[in-house]
Amino acid sequence: MRILIFGPNGSGKGTQSALLVNRFQVAHIESGAIFRDHAKRGTELGKEAKTYTDRGALVPDSITIPMILDRLNAADCAKGWILDGFPRNPSQAIALLDGLSKAGTPLDAVVEIQVDREIAKARLLGRRTCPAGHPNNLAIPGIQPVGEHEPYFCWKCGAELIGRSDDMDENAIDIRLNIYFDAENGTLAAVQRVHDWCKKSNTTYVTLDGSAKIDQVQAELCQGLGLT
Ligand code: AMP
């Protein structure tokens, strides 16, 4: 199974991707997480990427495109993948669709989670990271962390939560959302390109309302993908 998932930061695409990954045991390729991992390990790529990720700007295509295309060729991707966070602009979309076509790798479906900007922003400000990966968000009923102030604790396992530096900075959040909602040069322009490509190639395209509850979004996602 190979699925491309779009949605603004805060739409719940990471959570939905993780649920699919668990269910189908495929690789979760999350561009933002790859950059964070490099930054944590202090690699040259990580140091350079951090100068962009910290302010909410896109890491240049010259770094991001080969990094993702290479990653999709890794052994753990043979069984399938969920690609989350890439492409984010039209050049990345073209590079991905060309790369897949050259490699003879079919895309099974594209998922677009729609959520308006205000909801996305509130969720980004409310997002806290659990070291065990459980989703926690002050703005989402059902996964609200425990506590009255920082540090909060995971509603599921009780671990102390941390906030991502780019989620705590309102200016960085606005920049990230500007990039997503830019229908000329940003992610919505990439979405449009991929949508057109899906229509031409008869590839499943599922649109979801990301403001609904996680379980409901998941149920609609499975229905859209023809899974039971
Ligand atoms: P995310 O975890 O998806 O919010 O991504 C965190 C940050 O990683 C973004 O704000 C960008 O700086 C960088 N990033 C993630 N995906 C991409 C991409 N496809 N192209 C360029 N930069 C990216």
Image: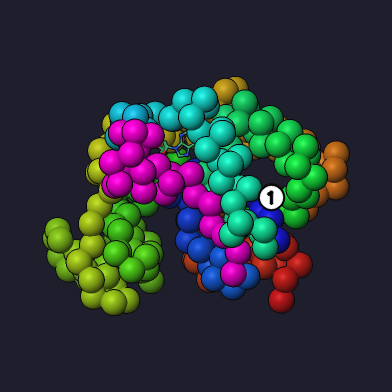
Q: Quadrant of residue 49?
A: top left
Q: Residue at x 85, y 43 (%)?
A: 201
169 left or right of 192 in image: left
In the image as oriented, which residue stretches furthest toward the top?
A: 184
Residue underneath mark 1: 110
Examine the structure image and report whether residue 135 is included in the region drawn in magenta. no
Where residue 71 sits in the image (x, y, percent)? Answer: 56, 46
Examine the structure image and report whether residue 26 is included in the region drawn in magenta. yes
119 left or right of 183 in image: left
Colouring used for the render: rainbow
> In the picture shown, does residue 5 fall above or below 196?
below
Q: Is residue 216 visible?
A: no
- The residue range painted magenta reads 25-47
Ligand 1 found in image quarter: top left
Q: Residue at x 72, y 53 (%)?
A: 109
Helix, strand or loop: magenta stretch: helix
> In the picture shown, does residue 166 fall above or below 13?
above
Q: Quadrant of residue 176?
A: top left
